[in-house]
Image (cartoon, rainbow, N blue to C red):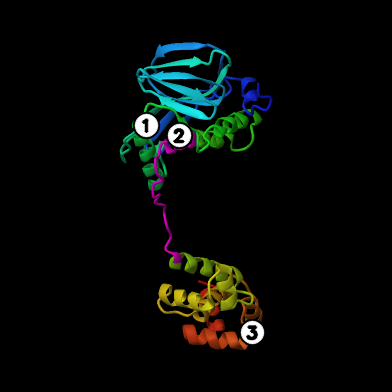
Amino acid sequence: MNNHFPYEFMKDRQDALERLDLRIYWGRYEIRVLRFHLTTFPPGKIVSFHKHAEYEFHFIPRGKGTVIMEENPYALREGMFYLTGPNVLHYQEADAAEPMDELCLHVDIIPHDVTPDDPDRLLWPAADPWEMAEADDCMEKLRGLPLKPSMDIHRAMPYFLEAYQASQEKYPGLYTTIKQCIIQILLRAVRAYESEPSEAELPSRDMKAYRYQLALEYIHANSSGEVVLDDVAEKLHISSRQLQRIFKEQAAGQSFSEILEHVRLEAVCRKLIDTNWSIDKIAIHEGFSSGSYLHTVFRKRYGYTPTTYRAMNVNL
């Protein structure tokens, strides 16, 4: 017997996960967990032909045996798994000389056609279209998986252990952890039968708009200090010339210096209204070299002086 069997302590409370009322909403599907445990088949143990109404995932972390699915026998050994159900007739038998451990996950998967007037739509308040597409793809593949064992090449089994540990250790985020473990078991089981990896399409960013937004956030956060184009470009891991082109394209032709000046003047306007600071103090605080320079820039931009702007707005 392997003394370092990592799943051994799941036998301490075999029904720990099954005591939880686990209902997971993934994409447009409700996944109800019915069984979720580690069990052991003694040597020679036979479970005669039977069916389940739900999906049942069988993983073999230790030992060996036989499964017959729809009259086809298959040898089982450590590291393999197979899927039965719904309504798949199957027979299980442990090796005559040694026990066989099995990690079991039984789930009932209920599709929901969610429409705006559906009373259940609040269960899907922020349905991510990418997640919904992946859930649809996983469920479609589950329905078409071949009735034969496969090796657990994508390591779904450790997620049984992680879910069990979460339930026992009661650490923050345990429900989310268990939910993600169940989804990972489904995904990794499906992936094990893929003959070739598919070209996964992932959501992508408009990198110019993204970098422009990051640059603006940096400028707003640091506008009262010294901000130069080279520093912002370095933060974005691009060249200064590339960043200048991004500003020209994303900001209707404005340059970096024009945008920085605009951000600083907006801050000056807020200070003129919200404080009784002097013009010189506001100028220095918001990144201008002096009150007189601020006066020149402000008048050129708005057509009147900072003092006039304050008088026009303070007592409105």
Question: First in sequence: mark 2 or mark 3?
Answer: 2
Lower position in the chain sequence, tag 3 or tag 1: 1
Marks 3 and 1 in Cβ contact (< 8 Å)? no
**Highlighted range, magenta:** 183-207
Q: In the picture shown, does residue 246 fall above or below 45?
A: below
Q: Amino acid at mark 3?
A: Ser
Alpha-carbon span between mark 3 and mark 1: 70 Å
The residue pinned by badge 2 equals 189
The image quadrant of residue 172 is top right
Q: Earlier in the sequence, mark 2 or mark 1?
A: 1
Q: Which residue is mark 1?
A: 145
Q: What is the magenta segment's predominant secondary structure?
A: loop
Image coordinates for residue 165, horizontal then vertical, percent: 62, 31
Q: Nearer the viewer, residue 204 or 185?
A: 185
Relative horizontal placement of residue 50, taking residue 295 as reference (left or right): left
Q: Quadrant of residue 248?
A: bottom left
Mark 2 Cα shell of 10 Å, populated few (<14), some (14-19), many (≥20): many
Looking at the rendered structure, the secondary structure element under dot 3 is loop
Question: In terms of depth relative to the viewer, which is nearer, 5 or 95?
Answer: 95
